Amino acid sequence: MDIIIIGFIAGIVGTITMDVLNGFFARVGLVAKIEAHMIGRMVAGWTRGRFRYGHPEEMTPVANERLYGYLAHYGIGVGLAVPFFFGWYLVFGELASPLLTVTYGIATTAASYFFVYPCMGQGIFGLRSQDGRRNVLTSLANHSFFAVGMAAVVAFA
């Protein structure tokens, strides 16, 4: 049971780290800002059976979309962390190392490249969005921040 709690905490801390560092680096113009309301719109579309859009403007605004976006964002963070730590523990009987955790966290970038961006109508890697190539770097940076936050939890567990 402790491993699930560690995974939960790592998912939350990783996502907080992602949000804080994204906010900082977005303010100085190095990455695009995470738009929680767009995540909320995407998730609201899922509840209506709409899983893919041809263009982000096809996603209609919904009440409380920012709240839904943050709930989904943090839920996804936990949903990526818990199975990773639990699975590693089941197979190897120990907590994954910080280095392995960083590697996994960075690898989760694939989820945004091949799932989230296409679902939002931004194409693979987010190249069809207004931020285009910048999305590639932004997503890699954000998931690196997520990885560091998770690894910090592992280092102190």
Image (cartoon, rainbow, N blue to C red):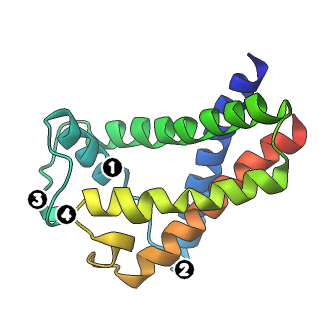
Residue under the image location 58 percent in, 71 percent down = 25
Which label belongs to residue 58?
3
Cα–Cα span, label 2 and label 1? 21 Å
Considering the numbered disc 2 on the image, is that residue within a helix, a strand or a loop?
loop
Name the residue beneath numbered marker 1: 39
Q: Earlier in the sequence, mark 2 or mark 3?
A: 2
| Quadrant containing the C terminus in the rendered view | top right
Q: CA distance from mark 4 to mark 1?
A: 11 Å
In the drawing, does residue 143 fall left or right of residue 58? right
Q: Residue furthest bottom?
A: 133
Q: Which mark is residue 11?
A: none
Q: Which residue is mark 2?
A: 30
Calculate the distance from the C-alpha at mark 3 to the C-alpha at mark 1.
13 Å
Mark 1 is surrounded, within 10 Å at the Cα level, by few (under 14), some (14 to 19) or many (20 or more) other residues, namely many
Q: Under tag 3, what secondary structure?
A: helix
Q: Between disc 4 and disc 1, whose residue precedes?
A: 1
Q: Disc 4 or 2, which lies upstream in sequence? A: 2
- The answer to whether mark 4 and mark 1 are in CB contact below 8 A is no
Kind of residue sitting beneath label 3: Glu
Query: Of the residues under marks 2 and 1, which one precedes in the sequence?
Result: 2
Q: CA distance from mark 4 to mark 2?
A: 22 Å
Horizontal and vertical percent for residue 45?
A: 18, 42
In the displayed orientation, state which residue is furthest to the front. 91
Secondary element type, mark 4: helix
Q: Nearer the viewer, residue 9 or 127?
A: 127
Give the left or right position of residue 24, taking residue 57 as reference.
Answer: right
**Mark 4 closeness class: few <14, some 14–19, many ≥20 residues within 10 Å:** many
